[in-house]
Amino acid sequence: MSKSRGRKTTKHTHKAAITQGLVKGMLEVTRSGIGYVVVADGSGDVLVRSHDFGNALHGDTVRVKVVKENLNTGKKEGKITEVVSRKQTEFLGHIQIANNVAFFIPATDREMPDIFIPLDKLNGAKNKDRVIVKMVQWEKSNRKPVGEVMNIMKPEDENDAAMKGLLAEAGFGLSFPDEVMEEALRLSDRISADEIAKRRDCRDILTFTIDPIDAKDFDDALSIKKINDDLYEIGVHIADVSHFVTPDSKLDEEAYKRATSVYLPDRVNPMLPEKISNELCSLRPHEDKCTFSAIFQISTKGAVKDFWLGKTVIHSDHRFAYEDVQQIIETKEGKYLEEILLLNSLAEILRKKRFDKGAINFSSQEVRFKLDEKGAPIGIMVKESKEANKLIEEFMLLANRTVAETIFKTKVDGKEIPFPYRVHDQPDEEKLQPFIEFAKKYGHKFDTSSPKKIAESFNQLLTDANGKPEQQVLEQLGIRTMAKAVYTTKDIGHYGLAFEHYCHFTSPIRRYPDVLVHRVLQSVLQNKVILDKKMEEKCKHCSERERAAMECERAGNKYKQVEFLKGHLGEIFEAVISGVSTFGFWAETIEHKCEGLVSIASLSDFDDFRHIESDYSLVGRRSGRMFRIGDKVKIKVVAANLDKRQLDFEWVLTGGTSSTAKTLDKPKKAKKKK
């Protein structure tokens, strides 16, 4: 922001300038009703008061006219002139009918007008019914938006309503527009002889898929063919979504808008209609399918001797679940035993090479819910990644890396091709230092002399902490110190995987960046290179939608966890302290991975606790009693709020919970300074 010249000012002087230009950004509406347009170029947010929203809502991409600017502080105020695109068009709430006029009252704590519903668009909804409404029109001249009832939620459909509410709030469509469905239905599953002739025919090579047991969209398959005793041809075959979803089609517009599928505990909200995701593009067994493949010649020692990239046609011989393959690996018995064991051996070699180059070995745990017929959770399971998962992961990583390297090496007039790389920046020193100090308390040392040495230190810590009480907390805190992986045309490499070049090529059914990768790669292979000037903008959109999907998925899991523990009020569970703040500590149950808050108020009867930020702990001023992140505790479930998706716990004290329970744990006491 340039400062004014030649005029003296005092701190009491208010200077403002009128700016005629328009800027583009995303509207964020606070709970208090004030709005801020977050401008993508980083030039500064623009404050917008509610009467200047026009017909914009929270999350919409808008154009705002800056009408006032303080040249001293850089603060700007503006008025929204246009909605470029809407984040959300479907809303959960209830119908209100009076004097033969119907309105929809949205269930939101952010400022939003009621939606007018024409009587012929109620679709059977009655006064006070809980419904999902789609906003179909909101002209600038109209004070109220106009909508149509899409679903009537019955009282027993509380789970369904909750999940749909999360999706709608995150801006993901609950259904596909009619024109998108019509376009999908017109697509044929027949692969013509002309199309097959354009592709490498891999149908006579042993091919199979390995996916979660409940998966319906199989977007990758592996093939294996022996060349000689020391060399094998391994094919990574990916559903050829770009064959069906063409640029500028209605299907493509909707897929780009969503940018990702969303995986909730009881459903998948797909990026593409099921006709494509579960039928045309799903690599189902015993069906010919169009694929885009990376085919490698790999020695038995894991050396990649050669590779080929291009369009193929395959015929999957078998559909494995991860559990099936894991059993084959462990028992050394089962279908395609020799091939499975060879692939697993190669994957282990590839994995070791990655770690030797500095990849970080963070383990992942996945929460799965056992649901009844109405979607209510009756059990929670924690699944860990095993050899079968890692087998698939390594070959997908190999394909992704190879495609990215191929594109990076291709230049047009000496310039790089706009391409959606998947990048992960090196750790930020400021974020890393507190973690290093905390890890020292458990005896773990860090070498920060280079990014590779930091990665090696992380891996050593993870190895040493394996199986110890602090393992999970160190992993969680370690992940928090890391930068977030994003899509961008700026190829800075992927630090966590230790790859100089990386992209997403292997999941085009559920990720739009993979569709973009397929299109660019095919253009390179055909020597008709696509130079998309809007690629960086598309990358930012896909990164934003990915974050929204992750937050939605976390909220869905949290809802089910709160719902589950609502049936266990008053019960006591073992837990690990997962976070600490000035107002209490969070604890996560070991058995179910359900996190709740033990408030500082509930601890005040026993001591006056202060927050030691550098130590991730609460320490009693009188007793020295310490609650530190990573400590094991026993907690009692005292409240479960589904609307807020919050759990309240109470620490089980020596001698009782509050005043009655028996001794169940002994938190650490702080060491006295000498």
Image (cartoon, helix red, strand yellow):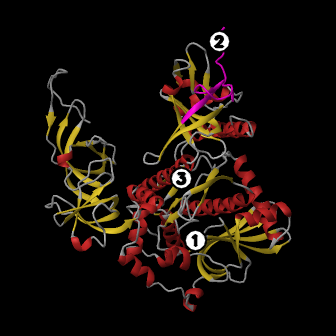
Three-letter amino acid code of the residue under disc 2 = Lys
Please name whichever residue, 298 or 225, is drawn nearer the observer in this view of the structure: 225
Tell me the number on the disc at residue 217: 1
| Relative horizontal placement of residue 182, taking residue 399 as reference (left or right) | left
Cα separation between marks 1 and 3: 24 Å
Asked whether disc 1 touches disc 3, contact meaning CB atoms under 8 Å apart, the reply is: no
Helix, strand or loop status at disc 3: helix
* Label 3 crowd bin: few (<14), some (14–19), many (20+), radius 10 Å: many
Range covered by the magenta-colored residues: 649-674
Q: Is residue 151 above or below residue 484?
A: below
| Relative horizontal placement of residue 2, taking residue 244 as reference (left or right) | left
Mark 2 vs 3, N-terminal side: 3
Q: Where is residue 211? Give x, y as percent.
A: 66, 66
The N terminus, quarter of image: top left
Cα separation between marks 2 and 3: 42 Å
Q: Where is residue 418? Give x, y as percent.
A: 45, 61
Q: Where is residue 114? Give x, y as percent.
A: 23, 56
Give the residue at x 68% y 34%. 470
Mark 1 vs 3, N-terminal side: 1
Tell me the number on the disc at residue 185: none
Tell me the number on the disc at residue 560: 3
Tell me the number on the disc at residue 672: 2
Helix, strand or loop status at disc 2: loop
